[in-house]
Amino acid sequence: MQSRTRDNTKQVLAKAKKGSIKSLGHAGATIRLTAKRSIRRRKKASAEGKPPSTRKGQLRGAIMYAVEKQNDLVAIGPEHTKVGKSASAHEHGGRYKRQRYPKRPFMGPALETTKERLPRKWAGSVKAH
């Protein structure tokens, strides 16, 4: 009795990498959407410990995500060119334009809220065909 085997390791690894990159994009989009929805548009400042408010929607519109394919990473957060250091002052507390900002985190809570759903983004990501 004879049998033959084929080594498909390279194809399987390529499919796994492609699926992982696609899943990273889905995870980044989910976290981004959760963070954007947590920021309400209103004139008054939000309470300390709650996500910040936005008057014109700049902070909400500045939240982006990008997948780095080489290192299998996704970066999610406010784009510095749009809102500068103000987002960091809100997230971690601190000074911005000579004012002290209390902690009003929005990115950390967005990750905490979605972390239970993230493994499902990878389920079925490696397809045979």
Image: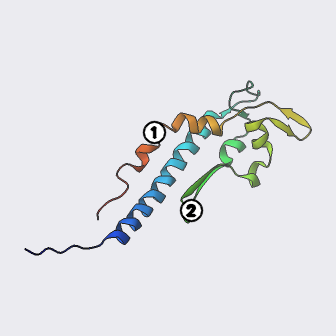
**Residue in the image at 89% along x and 41% along y:** 97
Residue 105 x %, y %: 69, 34
Other residues around mark 1 within 10 Å, as few (<14) / some (14–19) / many (≥20): few
Residue 87 x %, y %: 75, 42
Q: Horizontal placement of 75 versus 30: left or right? A: right
Q: Quadrant of residue 92?
A: top right
**Residue in the image at 73% along x and 38% along y:** 91
Label located before the other in sequence (2 or 1):
2
Name which residue type carries label 1: Arg
Q: How far apart are marks 2 and 1 (CA)?
A: 22 Å
Q: Classify mark 2: helix, strand or loop.
A: loop
Name which residue type carries label 2: Asn
**Residue in the image at 65% along x and 35% along y:** 39
Single out the residue that lies furthest toward the right: 98
From the image, tell me which residue sits under label 1: 117
Residue 100 x %, y %: 87, 33
Single out the residue that lies furthest toward the top: 47
From the image, tell me which residue sits under label 2: 71
**Residue in the image at 83% along x and 37% along y:** 94
